[in-house]
Structures are given as structure tokens and as C-alpha cells.
Image (tube, rainbow, N blue to C red):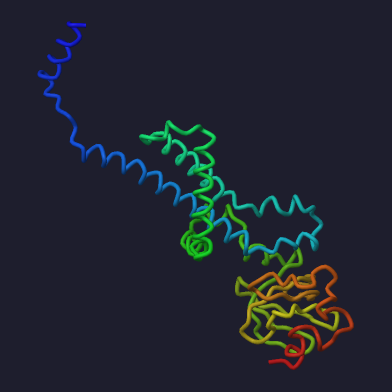
């Protein structure tokens, strides 16, 4: 014991060991929590972006395809943001465990605290519209564009029966449409075309169309929805909102469309 004490004192003198200043200890302690907070915010941003992408999609369109609901939904999951979210949850978990008081909590409690913290912060970011801004910042990044399903991709599948764009002209039986890629289409409409109440089929307005591709630039419309929103009112039968076959001139905005622009 005596030798141990002497060796320790000798080492202190030889290596000039001195007590660490309190401010360094406090700075290191604060830095650890700041790092955890930053990771939590990054995870929250991933949640906000994923929620934004999911909320923009029309999840009911599987009814108009030949795919099962599972096969339809699978490619629509925002894997890019979910993978990042998982990485940030792990980073936050290990960050908390490395803090001065992190050892006091069980692993399960740390996971719960991290997940709840990220979820709450993500909800607030989503409500503030941060998800859409983050998604806009990421657009143009090739890998990101390829890895996510967007509203534009979902509705630019004319072979599958989905088309979207800006109304160029509108008459009683046809709509001139400039699609999202800048191509011009002639869209046929008739008394059976279901026009959702919120859809504004007038010049300069953006719409989404469900129907059938007739030829290279001809499309027959079965249903017209507004670009923003999902037009789901009365989606079950297509009749309870006063729209559908035999309702010529009384379906939502159809009266305006029939008068033309």
C-alpha cells in the first residue's frame, strides 16, 4: 500500500498532473447533452420529412390498379428517411448512455425516452411545415429522387390510368391539359366523369385525373381530383356527394367546367 502511494505521488510530480478545472468538466458534460439533442433534432427532421411525403400521397389508388394493397403500399414507404431515423435513434441511445447520468437508466428506458423525444419533436416540426422544406432542399439529389415515391411520380403514370397537370383549356366534353412533364394531353370528359367538389377545372388550375389512356396524347377521365388534397369525400360509392353517372352539370365544379374557359 505504501509503495502504491509513493508511486502515485511520484507519477503526479513526474507527469505534472493537476486537477482538471471545473469549467472543462462542465463543458464536456454539456457537450455530451448538446450532441444528444442535435441527434434528436436530426431524427425529428427525418420524421417530419417522412410524414410530409406520406401525407402527399393518395393511398386509395390501389383500388384502380391490379395490385394488392400490400404490393401497392410497399414502394410508397419513405425508406430513405426511415433508415436515417433508425441511425439517429441508435446514435441518440449511445449518446445518452455515454453521459454522466446515462448509466442510471436501463437500456429500455433510454430507448423509450429517445423515441418519445424524437417523435414529439418530429410532430412539432411537421406541424411547422419543416418536412416540406427539407424535402424541397433534397430534391435534385439523384439518389434521393430515386429512393422516394412522390406525388408527382404517383400521378404521372398514364399507362396505369393516372395523369396530372395544369388545365390549359376546358369545354363541355374535353380538357386541354399540360402534364407535369410539360406534355400536352386531350382529356375526354362526359356525364359519367366524377369531379370531386374541391376540384377546380378551370384554366391555370392543377388537377389529378383517374382514367384510361386512349392513345399517345388522349386520355379518358373517370374521376378528377384537386391537386392539393385527396378528394376522398364520397370515395366509397362516388354518389353520396351528388357526383357520378347521370349527374351532369351538378357534380362539384362540373357546372363551371361545362361552361368552358
224 or 153: nearer the viewer: 224
Q: Which residue is the extreme one toward the right?
A: 246
Up the image or down, 129 lies above or below 252; here it is above
179 or 107: nearer the viewer: 107
Side of 23 relative to 236 (left or right): left
Side of 41 relative to 160 (left or right): left
Up the image or down, 51 lies above or below 101; here it is below
Side of 115 relative to 172 (left or right): left
Up the image or down, 203 lies above or below 235; here it is below
217 or 139: nearer the viewer: 139
Q: Residue at x 20, y 9 (%)?
A: 4
Image quarter of the C terminus: bottom right
Where residue 255 appears, as percent x and y from the top left, is 77, 90
Image quarter of the N terminus: top left
Quarter of the figure with residue 213: bottom right
83 or 99: nearer the viewer: 99
Where residue 98 appears, as percent x and y from the top left, is 39, 34
Quarter of the figure with residue 25: top left
Where residue 149 appears, as percent x and y from the top left, is 62, 57
Up the image or down, 221 lies above or below 19; here it is below
Please count the marks in the image: 0
Q: Residue at x 63, y 78 (%)?
A: 206
Where residue 13 appears, as percent x and y from the top left, is 10, 19
Amino acid at each position: 500500500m505504501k509503495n502504491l502511494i509513493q508511486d502515485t505521488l511520484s507519477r503526479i510530480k513526474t507527469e505534472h498532473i493537476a486537477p482538471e478545472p471545473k469549467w472543462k468538466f462542465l463543458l464536456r458534460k454539456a457537450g455530451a447533452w448538446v450532441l444528444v439533442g442535435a441527434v434528436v433534432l436530426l431524427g425529428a427532421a427525418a420524421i417530419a420529412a417522412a410524414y410530409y411525403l406520406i401525407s402527399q400521397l393518395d393511398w386509395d389508388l390501389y383500388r384502380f390498379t391490379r395490385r394488392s394493397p400490400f404490393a401497392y403500399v410497399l414502394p410508397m414507404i419513405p425508406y430513405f428517411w426511415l433508415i436515417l431515423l433508425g441511425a439517429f435513434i441508435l446514435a441518440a441511445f449511445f449518446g445518452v448512455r455515454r453521459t454522466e447520468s446515462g448509466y442510471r437508466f436501463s437500456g429500455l428506458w433510454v430507448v423509450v425516452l429517445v423515441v418519445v423525444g424524437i417523435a414529439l419533436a418530429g410532430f412539432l416540426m411537421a406541424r411547422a411545415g419543416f418536412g416540406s422544406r427539407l424535402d424541397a432542399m433534397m430534391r435534385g439529389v439523384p439518389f434521393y429522387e430515386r429512393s422516394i415515391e412522390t406525388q408527382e411520380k404517383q400521378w404521372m403514370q398514364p399507362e396505369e390510368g393516372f395523369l396530372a397537370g395544369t388545365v390549359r383549356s376546358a369545354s363541355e366534353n374535353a380538357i386541354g391539359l399540360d402534364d407535369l412533364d410539360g406534355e400536352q394531353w386531350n382529356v375526354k370528359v362526359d356525364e359519367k366523369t366524377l369531379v370531386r367538389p374541391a376540384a377546380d377545372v378551370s384554366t391555370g388550375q392543377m388537377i389529378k385525373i383517374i382514367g384510361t389512356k386512349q392513345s399517345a396524347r388522349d386520355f379518358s377521365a373517370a374521376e378528377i381530383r384537386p391537386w392539393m388534397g385527396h378528394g376522398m369525400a364520397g370515395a366509397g360509392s362516388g354518389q353520396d356527394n351528388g357526383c357520378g353517372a347521370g349527374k351532369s352539370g351538378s357534380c362539384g365544379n362540373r357546372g363551371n367546367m361545362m361552361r368552358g374557359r
